[in-house]
Amino acid sequence: MGIFKKIGNALKKTREALARRIDSLLSHGELDDDFYDELTDILISCDIGVRTSMDIVDSLRTRARKNKLRSAEDVKNELKTILKEEFSQADEIEIEYPAIITIIGVNGVGKTTTLGKLARYFKNQKKEVTLVAGDTFRAAASSQLTEWAERTKTRIIKHSEGADAAAVVYDGISSARAKKTDVLLVDTAGRLHTKTNLMEELKKIDKVINREYPEAHKYNFIVLDATTGQNALNQINAFSEFVTLDGIILTKLDGTAKGGVVVAIEKEYHLPVVFIGVGEGVDDLEKFDYNEFIDNLF
């Protein structure tokens, strides 16, 4: 299955929720104030966000009047143009090597599974990959990552449960430098911003990476569950207080009608979505393309 079709399938629930309601709205009358109010509600319901939805509708109102838009197709095309021109403000990330990618986020978003899929993705790019089992807090986290290492035929560096996560990362860096590894993928414990000790651990891991491997290209990617909608924005805000976030990996996009949260993320944080999960298979992780995403949204 091609990437365009995969993303289209992943956005099926969001597209059906959005397109069906917009088509129904457009079939009932003129582009008047009631129309724009209801359109705002539709966009908000798909988790595009209140402020972002209002900005989109204000732009559409201005352009519809100027260009004399009437048909449903014209309105949807203009919406796509607005979203592409005004709301894709994050710079696309091109990963450079050697790379250290640290995966962070709250519990249950799929960080360890995402690491396994990332290992497969980079190995498909003919890169040498090593996994670092930096989640020493959760029981069985290391064994789960080991299963992914075996499944993707990837090296793994791990310590015993309860070990110092920064020490595991230190050993991972030593191994990566010795073996000239292209990509070091670092797992971390799931945490909430209220867990001060775990947040401080993230800062310690960041410090070790900067000190021990200054020549590497470093990326902190936060994994967000698309089904949580606007709560994803709260997670970005909380984690960015402790570490610099470079990008987002959005999981479970295929299981939600709230895919519009991507637009809110781009608008409010200018933080790029780098990868998206488009299914449960090991190969169901794709580089994110904002224009392609918008083309599949309606």
Image: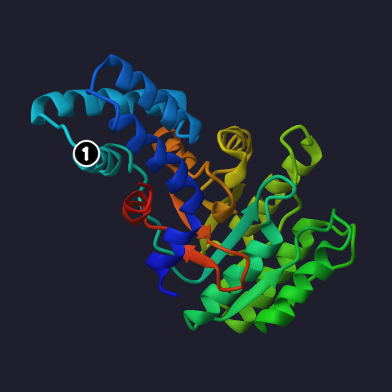
Give the structural element (helix, strand or loop) at label 1.
helix
- Quarter where residue 88 is shown: top left
Q: Residue extending furthest left? A: 67
Q: Position of residue 213 (x, y in %)?
A: 58, 64
Task: Specify few, some or many for label 1: CA neighbours under 10 Å numbering under 14, 14-19, or 20 or more.
Answer: some
Q: Position of residue 282 (x, y in %)?
A: 61, 73
At a point 48% along the width and 65% down the height, the residue shown is 286
- Quarter where residue 53 is shown: top left
Q: Which residue is denoted by mark 1 in the rendering? A: 78
Q: Residue extending furthest top? A: 33
- Report the side of 74 relative to 101 (left or right): left
- Report the side of 198 relative to 88 (left or right): right
Q: Quadrant of the N terminus?
A: bottom left
- Quarter where residue 131 is shown: bottom right
- Report the side of 87 relative to 192 (left or right): left
Q: Position of residue 52 (x, y in %)?
A: 39, 28
Camera-side residue of 47 and 107: 47
On screen, residue 171 above or below 65: below
Please name the colour scheme applied to the rendered image: rainbow
Does any portion of residue 257 appear in the rendered image? Answer: yes
Q: Position of residue 59 (x, y in %)?
A: 24, 27
On screen, residue 100 above or below 33: below
Question: How many numbered marks does the figure carry?
Answer: 1
Camera-side residue of 16 and 267: 16
Camera-side residue of 254 and 265: 254
Q: Amino acid at mark 1?
A: Glu
At a point 40% along the width and 73% down the height, the residue shown is 2
Camera-side residue of 244 and 266: 266
At a point 63% along the width and 34% down the height, the residue shown is 238
On screen, residue 50 above or below 267: above
Does any portion of residue 127 appear in the rendered image? Answer: no
